[in-house]
Image (cartoon, rainbow, N blue to C red):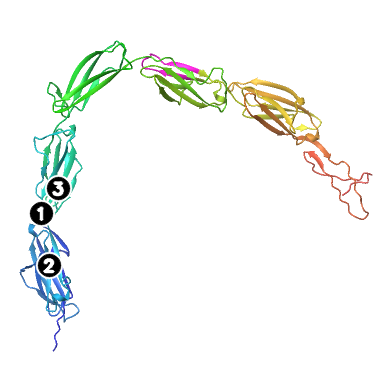
């Protein structure tokens, strides 16, 4: 009888925690038990099982159970179990089960196939946090950079560290390894750090109660600011009283504490505004902190009031006439004044958009607009306001704008026109300034001899004039369809405006060829064609013989 040794088919290692199986890594709290089960399948004879921890042989209690392989009674499965009480030393440890069998040789190269491993991750709380980088009683100065480092030793998972400043989270650089966790917060000391509490809190899901460490910062700093209070403005020779304050500094003389740390000190002074003072009179106060040698100062500028001159409008003369569509810029000039005057343009009570410029001691306001017929007679006002004057000062200009008529209209009388009767055509312009000159044209030639009346009527619309010209005609049938042109010209403006009216003259039918000669051949049909003009058009033609023999069909 021949006996064959058959290598195992597979090695499988499982870990059971609270009845749940895992295969690669088992996570377990410190002190709890973990059952490892190793199955070596499909061997003949049954395989042996060796337990190892971190690659070293481990004595295991109990024996391996041998079972018949599923589907093949000639092969055998081997199962072995190992119970581990997880301790801190097991964190990161690897537990392995190795199949031992006479058919396996090192030269076979199947070592990994017949070895299964599970890594332990043992959960245990981290150590309490500690802070380095600042010692109690140490004094920082503003602008000094300091890094506070919070450390927590051990722990799986590592501690979660959070920095807060006066209860509010701040930025940090967090690093965690298998042996410790650190969180670093870097800041540059400023006055707000005086008495600030920097707190590091360590937390872990393994240890529900948070642990904390904290430091309170002490900072020396120069005055945050020096404030000088004085009247905003005064006139030459005035006596002014002002107070000077510097807040939040370590004072060596009597002062009262600031609400958010440091001290507030003050000093009073009386000054006389010189008679030759220019636009501003400066008051300056110096403050120095013994702990921080750089002095601070504050300045108050008292404006010396000077009334400006009245405004003047430039860029438009009173007798100047602008043309509609022309773009014009008006300048309002005010000389002197302290503070500088505030200039604005008005059309009636409506403010206009403008831009203000400064040139030395002069102030300019520029108003740019494209004029139209509506601007004729418009009054533009430049208003100057100054803190040195009791009331505003105005300068005004009234615009004169020439503009053409917007259109021409031609009317006829009577309506409808009839041949053999006189007819009148009236050309009327829309308002223009100056009044438009009207003329009549027909076929490119003037027809002034037929004009019977011309007049000009002023209108209240933009101060313009309406022009009228009346043309009388003795109408005939030849005037039907004729075109008459009315032109408007203005000497002050370039170009002309014109409108065309086509005449519709009612008249009886008229044959353009009253007599037609034709030669007829006996027995042959004869075609004759005559056309008559009429307004309204001819509706029907009747042919008859000249000898009275009746109609011809």
Residue under numbered circle 1: 124
Q: Which is closer to the viewer, label 2 or label 3?
A: 3
Can you tell which quarter of the image residue 342 is in?
top left
Q: Is residue 93 above or below residue 62?
A: above
10 Å crowding of disc 2: few (<14), some (14-19), many (20+): many
Residue under numbered circle 2: 96
In the image shown, does 290 or 398 lie closer to the viewer? 290
User: Which segment is the magenta one?
Assistant: 381-396
Residue 387 on the magenta span = yes
Q: CA distance from mark 2 to mark 3?
A: 33 Å
- Is mark 3 in CB contact (under 8 Å) with mark 1? no
Residue sitting at 51 percent across and 21 percent down? 315
Asked if residue 520 shows in the view, the reply is yes
Along the horizontal axis of the image, is 408 left or right of 298?
right
In the image shown, does 492 or 406 lie closer to the viewer? 492
Residue under numbered circle 3: 182
Residue 258 on the magenta span = no
Along the horizontal axis of the image, is 231 left or right of 495?
left
Residue sitting at 89 percent across and 54 percent down? 525
């Amino acid at each position: 009888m021949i006996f064959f040794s058959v290598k195992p088919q597979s090695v499988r290692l499982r870990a059971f925690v609270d009845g749940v199986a895992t295969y690669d890594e088992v996570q377990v709290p410190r002190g709890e038990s973990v059952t490892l089960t190793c199955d070596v399948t499909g061997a003949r004879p049954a395989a042996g099982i060796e337990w190892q921890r971190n690659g070293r042989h481990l004595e295991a209690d109990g024996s391996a159970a041998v079972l018949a392989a599923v589907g093949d009674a000639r092969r055998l499965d081997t199962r072995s179990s190992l119970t581990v009480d997880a301790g801190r030393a097991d964190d990161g440890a690897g537990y392995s089960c190795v199949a031992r069998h006479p058919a396996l040789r090192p030269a076979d190269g199947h070592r990994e196939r017949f070895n299964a491993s599970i890594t332990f991750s043992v959960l245990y709380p981290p150590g309490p946090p500690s802070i380095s980088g600042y010692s109690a009683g140490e004094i920082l100065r503003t602008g000094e950079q300091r890094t506070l480092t919070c450390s927590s030793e051990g722990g799986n998972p590592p501690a979660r560290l959070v920095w807060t400043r006066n209860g509010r989270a701040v930025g940090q650089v967090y690093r965690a390894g298998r042996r410790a966790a650190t969180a670093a917060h870097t800041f540059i000391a400023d006055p707000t750090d005086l008495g600030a509490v920097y707190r590091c809190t360590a937390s872990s899901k393994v240890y529900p109660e948070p642990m904390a460490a904290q430091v309170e910062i002490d900072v020396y700093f120069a005055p945050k600011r020096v404030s000088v209070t004085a009247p905003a403005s005064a006139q030459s020779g005035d006596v002014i009283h002002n107070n000077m304050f510097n807040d939040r500094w370590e004072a060596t003389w009597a002062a009262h504490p600031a609400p958010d740390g440091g001290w507030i000190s003050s000093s009073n002074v009386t000054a006389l505004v010189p008679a030759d003072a220019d636009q501003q009179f400066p008051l300056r106060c110096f403050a120095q902190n013994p702990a921080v040698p750089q002095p601070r100062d504050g300045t108050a500028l008292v404006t010396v009031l000077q009334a400006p001159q009245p405004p003047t409008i430039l860029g438009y003369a009173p007798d100047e006439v602008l043309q509609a569509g022309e773009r014009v810029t008006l300048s309002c000039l005010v000389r002197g004044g302290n503070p500088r005057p505030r200039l604005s343009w008005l059309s009636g009570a409506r403010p206009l958009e403008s831009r203000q410029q400064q040139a030395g001691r002069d102030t300019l306001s520029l108003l740019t607009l494209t004029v139209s017929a509506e601007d004729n007679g418009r009054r533009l006002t430049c208003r100057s306001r100054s803190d040195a004057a009791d009331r505003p000062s105005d300068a005004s200009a009234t615009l004169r704008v020439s503009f053409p008529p917007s259109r021409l209209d031609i009317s006829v009388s009577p309506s409808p026109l009839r041949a053999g009767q006189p007819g009148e055509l009236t050309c009327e312009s829309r308002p223009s300034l100056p009044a438009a000159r009207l003329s009549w044209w027909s076929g490119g030639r003037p027809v002034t001899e037929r004009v019977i009346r011309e007049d000009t009527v002023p209108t209240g619309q933009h101060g313009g004039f309406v022009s009228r010209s009346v043309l009388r005609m003795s109408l005939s049938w030849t005037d039907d369809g004729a075109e008459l042109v009315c032109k408007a010209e203005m000497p002050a403006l370039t170009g002309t405006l014109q409108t065309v009216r086509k005449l519709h003259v009612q008249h009886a039918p008229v044959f353009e060829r009253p007599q037609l000669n034709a030669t007829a051949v006996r027995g042959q049909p004869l075609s004759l064609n005559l056309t008559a003009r009429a307004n309204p058009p001819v509706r029907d033609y009747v042919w008859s013989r000249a000898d009275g023999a009746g109609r011809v069909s």
